[in-house]
Image (tube, rainbow, N blue to C red):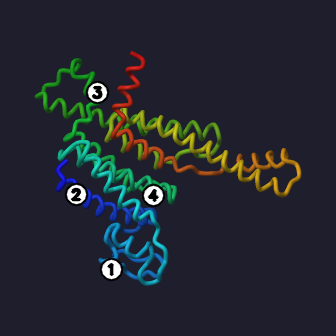
Amino acid sequence: MDPFLASAIFVLGLAFGSFLNVCIYRLPLDLSVVKPRSACPGCKRPIAFYDNLPVVSWLLLRGRCRNCRSKISARYLFVELLTAALFLGCYAYSGLTLATLKYCVFGFLLLGLIFTDAETKLLPDKLTLPGLVLGLLFSVLVPVHDMASQFLPPVLNLPFSADIAARLFSVLDSLLGAAVGASFIYGAGAAYLRWRGTEGMGFGDVKLMAMVGAFLGIKLTVFTIFAASLAGSVFGLAAVLIVWIKRTRRFARRLANLQAARRRGWQSAQMVYRHYQMPFGVFLGAMALIALFVGNQFLSWYGRLWW
């Protein structure tokens, strides 16, 4: 990597991370991300430009508002650093190419959706739908090179030049990825609704996976879904186990019978399992980022186990 370019991309990532924090806070409230200027949620006073510098201002102010001393969430610092690291990682992965721009845009959108879902259980259309369109547009410039591009050219002899035909197949791969991602999540949500009688996944997850499919294609979209399902299951089981242990200890102090305490603790854990709304978009977004960087390598390794 060129040190100067790497530093510039890292700083650019910090700036975009700062803007992403605005999106995470305002989009669920249906507020403009452009105006008014940033203000303290506590005292409502506008934040001066020198207090709005990515990372630096948070550290100098020790995570508090200069005026009212209200606490500023460490999420602001974390998102800025994570966005900068992601931009730098995309540059290291693809160099100074259009692919790097594509992956930076994709990562920016995913980080915004991950943190918004974690905080509000919402996946704003203002991130997913433009992301879907951008994924389709980028497929013209940066080849998706998935199943359609690999298997259809020998079968379909299109009356275009090789370059134009490759771009058309790339767009088809992007469309198929979006369709498969959205259909899989929609079908899973419909099956869960029929089985449990409650909504398991909303349309936000469907739109998120349509966006992921448009950027990544079919194979990495399927990888994302299965990896996210596994990660979500592990998280859910761990949450139930932790609640059971904590509630059992609490009931053990009130009840003389340890067996009764365990039974009461398990009842509490079951209530958490039934009523806790897991932000599945967090797992889908996180696994899509992993798929972006190591998904193809994992699939190649996994395929060699069977051939």
Given contact means CB atoms under 8 Å apart, are the residues at marks 4 and 2 in contact?
no
SS under mark 2: helix
User: Which amino acid does the dot numbered 2 rest on?
Assistant: Ser
Which residue in the protein does label 3 denote? 148
At mark 3, the secondary structure is: helix
Marks 3 and 1, the one that precedes in the sequence: 1
* Structural distance between the alpha carbons of marks 3 and 1: 52 Å
**Type of the residue with mark 4:** Thr
Looking at the rendered image, the quarter that the C terminus falls into is top left
Alpha-carbon neighbours of circle 3 within 10 Å: few (<14), some, or many (≥20)? Answer: many
Q: Secondary structure at mark 1?
A: loop
Residue at left 39%, top 71%? 59
Residue occupied by mark 2: 7
Distance (Cα) linking label 4 and label 1: 25 Å
Q: Earlier in the sequence, mark 4 or mark 2?
A: 2
Labels 3 and 4: the sequence-earlier one? 4
